[in-house]
Amino acid sequence: MSGSAVVIGFGSIGRYHSGLVGQRYDNVAIVDFDPEARNAASALHPNAMIAGSLDELDKRGWEWNQSLGIIASWGPDHASTFFDLVSRGVMRLLCEKPLANSISLAAEMVDVACGDSVTLGIHHHRRYSGLVTGMRSLANKLAIGDPQAVYITGGASGLVTNGIHHIDWIVELFGEWPELVISTARGEKINPRSPELQFYGGTAAWMFPSGREATISFSNRSSVSPKIIIYYRDAIAELLDNSEIEINLRDEASIKKHPLVTRTGVAMVLGQRAQIPGVLKLEEATSRLLDEIDLDRVKVFTPYDAQLALGACIGALTSGLTHSAIHLPIDPESEDGTREWPIS
């Protein structure tokens, strides 16, 4: 495909995006302040223009208004990078999660995207993967009804780093955004990406308008991978690795004998264990988002959706800080909305 792309940041995520856009666009530039990262970028992408800053690309005559901008730096830099690119005439952008490191900054980015003809996509790739659509199709085949609760437990996976992806697909599964969160979230300086970032563990419970709940509990004292359990009225589903799912049902005879929900029983009848149908690979999901951005129509997951997902996670961090329940969505102009967090 003709066109240009600029990738800001050449960490692991920047490497991923650089490889993808290198196959998609004719001209690619990669920007990173770290000399070692630039050397790695030069070795992997010899045809790309490598620079240490946006100013350096200015001096080298880069045509910004023809370019897609990809923001793959750390979360605290997302907003400033976004505005730097927009000021140079970039009108199509993909931003990594989280959208920003405060609700206020995220809201400013969304306002610009909505008001200045800037097309902004945020890389919540699970929304583009077909994951929830496939899960619903299996649930419909087994006639187990709607999901009622989600519990995710595990080791040091990060209430924001990975939690933001989880809360997002849960929102899609439930078909509604949470209205309240309470948590014990706390940060530690163990983030492998940068010593300036924190890594958040603890337990967060989100309450939804329908009365359903989602809980994520990650311990920074454990290296065990997360376990993802979805409860239905009379069934339980576990999301496994590689987009596989196992659904177990309660025995029909026991349900008929004691139909009240308070007469609980073990879900031990295997209903299905299989690959979730129709789930795209990561590269394909990202390409779907890039297709939307190139067409100036981001529909599947809008910038405001990204602001709400960020708010759900920042709400959990705020609850851990203040030891109180946090109502959602958070007002961007409030004290909680303007507070900046060392997240990525």
Image (spheres, rainbow, N blue to C red):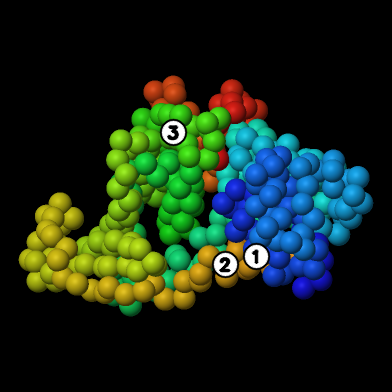
Direction from residue 281 to residue 269 in the image, left or right: left
Direction from residue 224 to residue 129 in the image, left or right: right
Graded by Cα atoms within 10 Å as few (under 14), some (14 to 19) or many (20 or more), the crowding at tag 3 reads: some
Front-most of residues 88 and 12? 12
Q: Which residue is mark 2?
A: 283
The structure residue drawn at horizontal position 73% and vertical position 52%, both measured from the top left corner, is 30
Q: What is the three-letter code of the residue carrying label 2? A: Glu
Measured as percent of width and height from the top left, residue 165 is found at 48, 51
**Is 138 drawn above or below residue 202 in the view shown?**
below
Q: What is the three-letter code of the residue carrying label 3? A: Ile
The residue mark sitting in front, 2 or 3, is: 3
Residue at mark 2 to residue at mark 3: CA–CA distance = 29 Å
Q: Earlier in the sequence, mark 3 or mark 1?
A: 1
Measured as percent of width and height from the top left, residue 91 is found at 81, 54
For numbered disc 1, what is the local secondary structure? helix
For numbered disc 3, what is the local secondary structure? loop
Tell me whether circle 1 and circle 2 mark residues in contact (CB < 8 Å): yes
The structure residue drawn at horizontal position 88% and vertical position 53%, both measured from the top left corner, is 62
Q: Image quadrant for the N terminus? A: bottom right
Q: Which residue is mark 3?
A: 190
Front-most of residues 162 and 36? 36
Direction from residue 156 to residue 99 in the image, left or right: right
The structure residue drawn at horizontal position 70% and vertical position 48%, both measured from the top left corner, is 38
The structure residue drawn at horizontal position 65% and vertical position 44%, both measured from the top left corner, is 36
The image shows a total of numbered marks equal to 3
Q: Which residue is mark 1?
A: 20
Q: Quadrant of residue 257?
A: bottom left
Measured as percent of width and height from the top left, residue 120 is found at 71, 53
Q: Is residue 199 visible?
A: yes
Q: Earlier in the sequence, mark 2 or mark 3?
A: 3
Measured as percent of width and height from the top left, residue 109 is found at 71, 42
